[in-house]
Image (cartoon, helix red, strand yellow):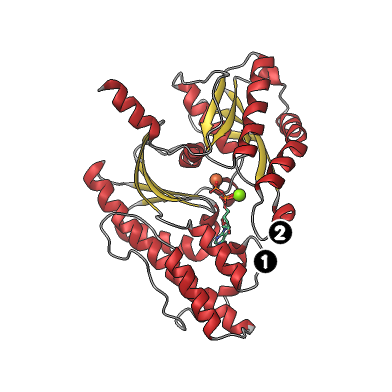
Amino acid sequence: MRFLGIETTCDETAAAVVALKPEGGGEILANEVFSQIAEHQAYGGVVPEIAARAHIEVLDRLIQRALETAKVELDDLDGIAAAAGPGLIGGVIIGLTEGKALALAARKPFVAVNHLEAHALTARLAGGLDFPYLLLLVSGGHTQLVAVRGVGDYVRLGATVDDAVGEAFDKVAKMLGLPYPGGPQVERVALKGDAARFDFPRPMLGRPKPDFSFSGLKTAVRLEAEKIAPLNPSAVADLCASFQAAVVDTLVDRLRAGVRVFGERIGPCQAMVVAGGVAANSAIRRALMRFCSESGLRLVVPPVGLCTDNGAMIAWAGIERLRLGLSDDMTFAARPRWPLDSEAEALHHGKA
Ligand code: ATP
Ligand code: MG
Ligand code: FE
């Protein structure tokens, strides 16, 4: 089974071709990603209008290139998948419409993919990972702990009540004068800093429900930065290192709560998976490895290129769904909001 996947929900335009391997798992035949970072840099964040225009400009060429790299024609595909949300509505409409149009023209099954479901299933692309598992999704737009029980069967155990963790990295970077996107900059600068210099809050520490909060931490960094202004490079490094240390402690503590809740509600937790751009952070990766090895959990971290937004994850989610007979028709509308557990709820209520 071969799938084209299209991703346009945020600031990456992406198209990929993935094939299902006979032994399970997928093979990525092409994975084209056009990141719009340069377009948004001057504004210090993603501008929805600019994002939508940039998607229109590059999407056709990107799909063409993906098909060429994969050496397949539209006709050779078994289906086409496009992210239908959640995300910036202008961009979502562009990718979704393109996906539907290609599916209609080539008479192929069409799958409307939940972007979060694609993140959740990516770890299975490499093969050898069975349900259920615990997903930590940490990106610029999302911070959630999700029990992945099966395709279309998700239980959201906890989520951020305010900022996403990537958003906190980006905002802290901005207030310290570091360029956008801030996450990689904060990590780089933190290497030279003293993580013990500032004792920043670890929000939600010890709470039984695995929710997150990063807005208070972000404010604490701002207040401290204002107090010690003017900032020199060593102060910025100490602020970044202390901030990152607080994030690491918070994530590990919330994860511990997540594993406990998973055990109570789902069953014994044996594996955990990380997804989202923040999973690129090596201090966070190290902390997760330590936590998982101490707790006897298998940790699956997809390569960084599959953690951030990409088309391969959309194609793979399309494969996982069509394999179960799930596809969508041309009436499927773009969804700016689309909680991951809505389908399980709908199925559940439908049965009841
Ligand atoms: P979505 O939430 O819809 O997936 P997104 O485009 O914001 O949207 P990603 O592309 O997965 O998400 O990730 C981008 C985020 O990851 C940004 O907030 C960025 O700062 C953060 N990030 C990337 N690298 C690092 C890093 N090394 N350390 C910390 N944060 C990072
Ligand atoms: Mg992105
Ligand atoms: Fe994403």
Residue 191 lies in quadrant: bottom right
Callouts 2 and 1 close, C-beta under 8 Å: yes
Q: Is residue 250 above or below residue 20?
A: below
| Position above or below: 237 against 161 | below
Does residue 24 appear to the left or right of 212 in the view shown? right
Front in this rendered view, residue 285 or 43: 43
Which quadrant holds the C terminus? top left
The spot of residue 259 in percent (x, y) is 30, 52
**Farthest residue, direction left:** 264
Q: Which mark, by number, is residue 41?
A: 2
Rendered residue at 31%/22% (across/down)? 350
Query: Along the horizontal axis of the image, is 54 left or right of 342?
Result: right
Residue at (65%, 70%) from the top-left corner? 178
Q: Which quarter shows the N terminus?
A: top right
Of the pair 166 and 25, the residue shown nearer to us: 166
What is the three-letter code of the residue carrying label 2?
Answer: Gln
Element marked by disc 2: helix
Quarter for ligand 3?
A: top right
Disc 2 to disc 1, C-alpha distance: 8 Å
Left or right of residue 212: residue 139:
right
Are there few (<14), some (14-19), or many (20+) residues within 10 Å of tag 1? Answer: some
Residue at image position (31%, 52%) is 258
Q: Which label's residue is closer to the chain start, 2 or 1?
A: 2
Q: Relative to residue 77, is residue 269 depicted above or below?
A: below
Horizontal relation, residue 228 to residue 70: left or right: left
Helix, strand or loop under label 1: loop
Residue 260 percent location from the top left of the image: 25, 52
Please tell me which residue lies in front, 29 or 158.
Answer: 158
Q: Which residue is mark 1?
A: 179
Q: From the top left corner, tell me how far across and down residue 329 is, in percent.
A: 54, 18
Q: Is mark 2 within 8 Å of ligand 1?
A: no
